[in-house]
Amino acid sequence: MDVTAADGDADTGTAAGMLVRLGPSSSFVGAAGELAGQPTLNEKQAIALLIVCRQLDRIRRGDDTGGDGGGQLCLFIGGEGGAGKSRIIEALAELLARRDLSSRVLVTATSGTAAARINGITLHSACGLTVGQGGRAGGRRGH
């Protein structure tokens, strides 16, 4: 069936139209699904990535139906060294880089070694804090 402009609603002066986009998914969850299928993420890591991406889609849509009443997601990903926490960070960073959003994210870690592993910086560097004598972080000495 062919639809022409003459088939549109003559009373309102509007014509029927449709926009179809072909290519990669425009949602974060759709794009994360592609990354989650790669062999670098195990099932639990893929789930964590999808949870974060679902929240990013909600924020982008302005949708507050996540049950928390706000746009913030608080998610703890724990485990001993070598558990794969960094792989989740790397996958999320790759996803954001593909969407040209890397400049909107600051990747931090509590130690220099961990920061280097995820191509980030330490928390104290991000906050502009220095480590004084005695190992205490702070901007001032002796207080």
Image (cartoon, rainbow, N blue to C red):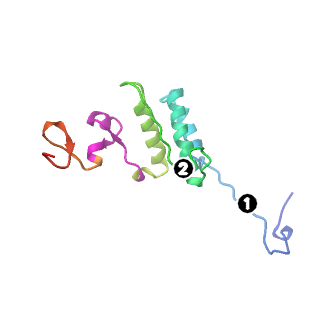
- Residue 14 image-quadrant placement: bottom right
Q: Is residue 82 magenta?
A: no
Q: Nearer the viewer, residue 52 or 69?
A: 69
Magenta range? 104-125
Chain-order first, disc 1 or disc 2: 1
Q: Position of residue 89 (x, y in %)?
A: 42, 37
SS at badge 1 = loop
* Vertical arrangement, residue 129 with respect to residue 115, above or below: below
Q: Nearer the viewer, residue 92 or 78?
A: 78
Q: Nearer the viewer, residue 125 or 135?
A: 135
Which residue is the extreme one toward the front?
A: 143
> How many labels were placed on the picture?
2
Q: Position of residue 120 (x, y in %)?
A: 33, 42
SS at badge 2 = loop
- Labels 1, 2: front one: 2
Seen at 42% across and 50% down, the residue is 102
Seen at 47% across and 47% down, the residue is 96
Residue under label 2 = 70
Residue under label 1 = 18
User: Disc number at residue 53?
Assistant: none
Seen at 48% across and 47% down, the residue is 98
Q: Nearer the viewer, residue 125 or 32?
A: 125
Callout 2 amino acid: Gly
* Vertical arrangement, residue 120 with respect to residue 18, above or below: above
Callout 1 amino acid: Met
- Residue 13 image-quadrant placement: bottom right
Seen at 42% across and 31% down, the residue is 85
Q: Position of residue 113 (x, y in %)?
A: 28, 33
Q: Position of residue 18 (x, y in %)?
A: 73, 60
Dot 2 alpha-carbon crowd within 10 angstroms: few under 14, some 14 to 19, many 20 or more: few
